[in-house]
Amino acid sequence: MNRPANPRSTARSAARLAAVQALYQHQMEGTPQARLLDEFHQHRLGKEIEDEQYADAEVDFFDDLVAGGLARREEIDEALMARLREGWTLARLDKTMLQILRAGTYELIARADVPKAAVISEYVDVAKAFFDDREAKFVNGVLDGVAKDVRKD
């Protein structure tokens, strides 16, 4: 039996994908946080772009992921580096992959209200939007390791 998707879950999934895109834009273009959030609120979240309808995102959740991800980047990067194989650096990762891992790590660190299994599953799904299964499994492994380090649940 197919149940309709939970609207809150769908809105949070959309917020996660948009947050990864916003963090990527910030890294690539240096867009200031306030302008970045405003641009996504006005022109991306729930809008139609190039004949593609973007899902309505939970705006407060999106804002927290982006603002928190930027504010706690050093802590996030340390947690990620602890889980990369020896010889790997964050600079060696694909730029989109890095933002997926940063957003997921922020959520694991700062959003205890979201179960760790849900966080990991959601970012594996985000990775599948950009990459093949191999990379999605990489996201699963890294975020699972981070979760073991930062969550006690």
Image (cartoon, grey):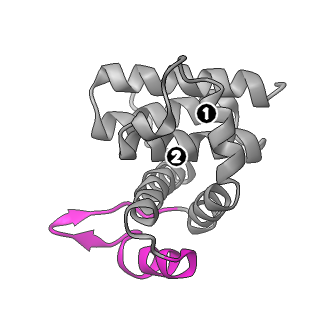
Determine whether 70 is above or below 2 in the image: below
Q: Disc 2 marks which amino acid?
A: Asn
Query: Where, quadrant-wise, is the C terminus in this rendering?
Result: top right
Which residue position holds label 2? 6
Report the Cα–Cα distance between label 2 and label 1: 31 Å
**Residue at the image position 61 percent from the left and 22 percent from the top:** 144
Determine whether 43 is above or below 149 in the image: below
In terms of secondary structure, where does tag 1 sit? helix
The mark found on residue 47 in the picture is: none
Q: Which residues are magenta?
A: 32-57
- Which quadrant of the figure has residue 30? bottom left
In terms of secondary structure, where does tag 2 sit? loop
Image position, residue 64 (x, y; %): 65, 62
> Is residue 81 left or right of 27 when viewed as pictured?
right
- Which residue reaches farthest front? 87
**Residue at the image position 62 percent from the left and 55 percent from the top:** 69
Determine whether 52 is above or below 115 in the image: below
**Residue at the image position 46 percent from the left and 65 percent from the top:** 26
Q: Is the residue under label 1 in contact with that under label 2 (CB below 8 Å)?
A: no
Image position, residue 116 (x, y; %): 68, 30
- Which quadrant of the figure has residue 65? bottom right
Of labels 2 and 1, earlier in sequence is: 2
Which residue position holds label 1? 80
Image position, residue 126 (x, y; %): 40, 40
**Residue at the image position 45 percent from the left and 63 percent from the top:** 22
- Which residue reaches farthest left? 51
